[in-house]
Image: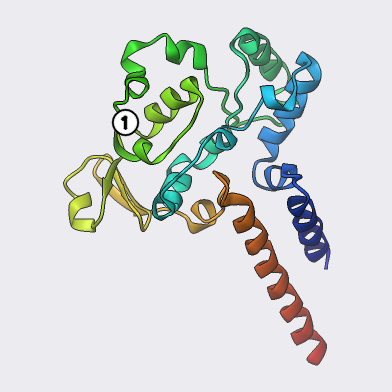
Amino acid sequence: QQEAEQLEREISQLRTGDHDASYEAEAPEAARLRRLLRAELGLSAEQVPFLCTTLQIPDESWQDAVEGVLGNYRFSLLVPPEHYDEAMRLYRERRHQDNLHGVGLPDVERILNRPDLTGSLRGNLAGLSSQVQTQHPGVRAFVDLLLGNVALCDTLDELREHRTAVTRECFLRRNYSTSHMNPRVYRRWFIGERAVPRQIEQRQARLEEIRAELLTCQDK
């Protein structure tokens, strides 16, 4: 019953445009650090976005693969370069007290200062990063760093020809070892305009399961 009430609250929040509920549920550490950075450094919500909110995936057939390979990187926090040192100092001071482990703060300034990491800014998109769009130059370079070496494959046979690659079915090959990614990660979309409708749909499905379970219990 408690889970059902929580799901109903989250569905209501998502429908009214309040997306914080989904981040609190999926990435609570990142949500806590974001609140801390905003409060202590006086930053607006727009100045500390989650990485996933700056991305788009035009081809839906690759969305599962992008979401799965990025995984927790989706909830990395972007901070203005002039506040990066302050943000890291605060992160270090409060990491244990506020349980902030595992949250990434991409050093966009350093990435942009590395010519070898900014090929995508010249239109040289490669691998899985070619399936991701963003208007943020620093994010473009960071995503290319994460996904640019992940080759796109249509079949398992093709996958074997690469050291690092992925299929639309979410078979991922890294260092010549192939595995299937966890559906609990890649089916929870957080990127682009399709994400919120998918999150609402999944919560509604779980809500129906709970209601069915309750009815079954009542009938016994």
Local crowd size for mark 1, using a 10 Å CA cut-off: few (<14), some (14–19), many (≥20)? some
Relative to 161, is 129 on the left or the right?
right
Q: Residue at x 53, y 22 (%)?
A: 106
Q: Is residue 42 above or below residue 142?
A: above
In the image, farthest residue toward the bottom: 220
Which quarter of the image is occupied by the C terminus? bottom right
Amino acid type of the residue tagged 1 in the rendering: Leu
Q: Residue at x 51, y 24 (%)?
A: 136
Q: Residue at x 67, y 12 (%)?
A: 89
> Which is more toward the observer, 52 or 30?
52
> Which is more toward the observer, 203 or 16?
16
> Which SS class for mark 1?
loop
Q: Is residue 33 above or below residue 80?
A: below
Which residue was labeled with disc 1?
A: 125
> Which is more toward the observer, 61 or 206?
61
Q: Is residue 24 above or below residue 167?
A: above
Q: How many marks?
A: 1
Q: Is residue 76 above or below residue 20?
A: above
Residue 73, x across and y down, in percent: 52, 35
Which quarter of the image is occupied by the N terminus? bottom right
Residue 27, x across and y down, in percent: 65, 41
Relative to 32, is 131 on the left or the right?
left
Residue 78, x across and y down, in percent: 60, 24
The way the protein has been coloured in the rendering is rainbow
Residue 55, x across and y down, in percent: 52, 36
